């Protein structure tokens, strides 16, 4: 069990992450100062440094806390015995909901991903982990004979990109089942 002190420390940590998340999404990491974060959180700057050494550390705390990898791992880990379409549909609708709920995270990722090489490298590592989760699931389904052999990494990238594109374009999430069907069935006419 955690003590009250540990609980308060975690609550303060979470408050600082949430405050930085809001400010980074609104102003960008570069345009947000430690002073801005401390003032918005109602704490002294020194206290913020007790929890985080830098804005970059805060940025990574945000990415680690709000990335969808834990949710995707849980879906694919609990997928045995379920049809591949059902699992992919669950993963896609969950991913869409997470993107919708975490718009500010998307804003941060896009802004920082386009301007900061150090961020790009670390973010690509997280992407590779997520791709490995989905790819592993598809490879197991290939091994079971449910799917034909194919480049599973390309499929996962197509899948994820399609969900993000649906969200960013303002299209209806009702398109998600069609995306899954197109991915599973292909679009070429039989010869």
Image (cartoon, rainbow, N blue to C red):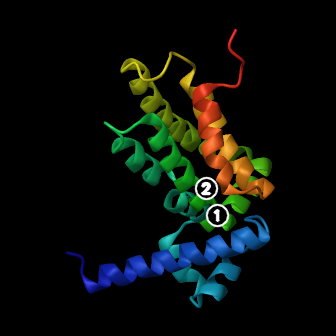
Residue occupied by mark 1:
100
Which residue corresponds to the image point at 74% horizontal and 54% vertical from the top-left?
110
Which residue corresponds to the image point at 61% horizontal and 56% vertical from the top-left?
96
Which residue corresponds to the image point at 50% horizontal and 17% vertical from the top-left?
148
82 or 49: which is nearer to us?
A: 82
145, above or below 191, in the image: below
Q: Residue furthest top?
A: 191
- Rendered location of residue 140, percent (x, y): 39, 26
33 or 11: which is nearer to us?
A: 11
- Rendered location of residue 188, percent (x, y): 71, 19
**Residues packed near mark 2 inside 10 Å, few (<14), some (14 to 19) or many (20 plus):** many
50 or 115: which is nearer to us?
A: 115
Residues under numbered marks 1 and 2 in contact, where contact means CB atoms less than 8 Å apart: yes
Q: Quadrant of residue 28?
A: bottom right
Which residue corresponds to the image point at 65% horizontal and 86% vertical from the top-left?
40
Name the secondary structure under disc 2.
helix
Residue occupied by mark 2:
96
Is residue 54 visible in the rendered image? The answer is no
């Amino acid at each position: 069990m955690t003590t009250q002190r540990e609980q308060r420390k975690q609550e303060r940590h979470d408050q600082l992450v949430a405050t930085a998340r809001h400010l980074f999404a609104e102003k960008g990491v570069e345009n947000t100062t430690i002073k801005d974060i401390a003032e918005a959180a109602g704490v002294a700057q020194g206290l913020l440094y007790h929890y985080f050494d830098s804005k970059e550390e805060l940025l990574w705390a945000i990415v680690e806390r709000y990335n969808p990898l834990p949710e995707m791992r849980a879906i694919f880990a609990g997928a045995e015995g379920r049809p591949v379409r059902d699992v992919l549909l669950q993963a896609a609708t969950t991913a869409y909901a997470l993107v919708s709920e975490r718009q500010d995270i998307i804003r941060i990722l896009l802004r920082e991903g386009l301007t900061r090489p150090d961020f790009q490298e670390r973010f690509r590592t997280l992407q590779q982990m997520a791709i490995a989760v989905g790819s592993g699931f598809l490879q197991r389904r290939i091994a079971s004979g449910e799917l034909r052999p194919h480049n599973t990494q390309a499929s996962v990238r197509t899948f994820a990109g399609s969900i993000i594109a649906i969200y960013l374009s303002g299209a209806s999430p009702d398109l998600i089942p069609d995306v899954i069907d197109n991915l599973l069935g292909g679009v070429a006419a039989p010869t």
